[in-house]
Amino acid sequence: DAGVIQSPRHEVTEMGQEVTLRCKPISGHNSLFWYRQTMMRGLELLIYFNNNVPIDDSGMPEDRFSAKMPNASFSTLKIQPSEPRDSAVYFCASSFRTGGYETQYFGPGTRLLVL
Amino acid sequence: QKEVEQNSGPLSVPEGAIASLNCTYSDRVSQSFFWYRQYSGKSPELIMSIYSNGDKEDGRFTAQLNKASQYVSLLIRDSQPSDSATYLCAVLNTGFQKLVFGTGTRLLVSP
C-alpha cells in the first residue's frame, strides 16, 4: 500500500510568493493532519480534518495560511504571501479515527525554504 | 510551561547500553502517551504507545508512565547504532483530540 504522499518534496521560493503544498492521505483514512517542524519550535499541529471537515485550525499561524480538503483523497496547504519565517518542514499525516485514539502515519514531508 | 517537555540532548550511549529518554507533560487529564522515532531527514514513526501507569514492553523498548508525576519515559535496551535518531514524546490533548509533541531528544549510539 502507498503511504501518505506529499508534493513537492522540496520547495524554494522568494518572499511574497504563493506556496501550495499537497497531500494524498492513505486510502480509507478519515482524518488528515498538517504539521510544521522547525528546530526552534519542534513539531506543531497546524490544522486537522475529520471526514474532510476542518475540526481544529487553532495552530494555523495567521491568515496567510489556509488549508482545504475538497475530498477524501486530497488536501492542500497554501501560504500566501510567503515569508522567510515560514521556512520549515511541513508534514501531512493521516489516520483512521474511530472514536478512540488511532495511529497517525506521516508523509515524507515538504522542505520549504523562503528566501 | 510547555505542554510537553524533553531534554534536547544529545544523549550519547555506547552500543549495548540502556538508553533512557524522559518526558514530562503539563495536562493532568491526559490519558494517552506516545513515543515517535525520527531519523534525520525522515518523517516521525510511532514506536510505542502507553495508556496506563506502569511499564509496557515491546522487544527492546519499554515505555514507563507515571501519571501522578506527569512523567513518561522510554528505555531502549541493548542500544544499537541504528537506534541513533531523535525521539519525540507526544501526549494526546484530551479536549481537542490532537497530539502535542515535545521537541525531541537526540540519541547517539556509538559502536
Image (cartoon, coloured by chain):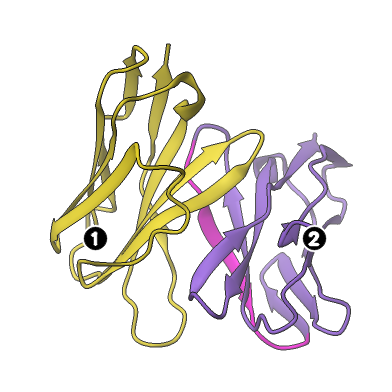
Chain colours: A yellow, B purple
**From the viewer's perspective, is A59 left or right of A65?**
right
Q: Identify the residue shown where x is 31% and y is 74%.
A: A96
Which chain does the residue under circle 2 lie in?
B
Q: Which quadrant is home to the N terminus of chain A?
A: bottom left
**From the viewer's perspective, is A15 left or right of A61?**
left
The amino acid on which the numbered mark 2 sits, given as a three-letter code, is Arg
> In the image, which residues are magenta?
B42-53
Residue at the disc numbered 2: B77
- What is the secondary structure assignment of the residue under circle 1? loop
Dot 1 and dot 2 within a common chain: no
Mark 1 in CB contact with mark 2 (< 8 angstroms): no
Q: Identify the residue shown where x is 74% and y is 56%.
A: B2
The amino acid on which the numbered mark 1 sits, given as a three-letter code, is Ile
Residue at the disc numbered 1: A26
Q: CA distance from mark 1 to mark 2?
A: 33 Å
B86 relative to B102, above or below? above
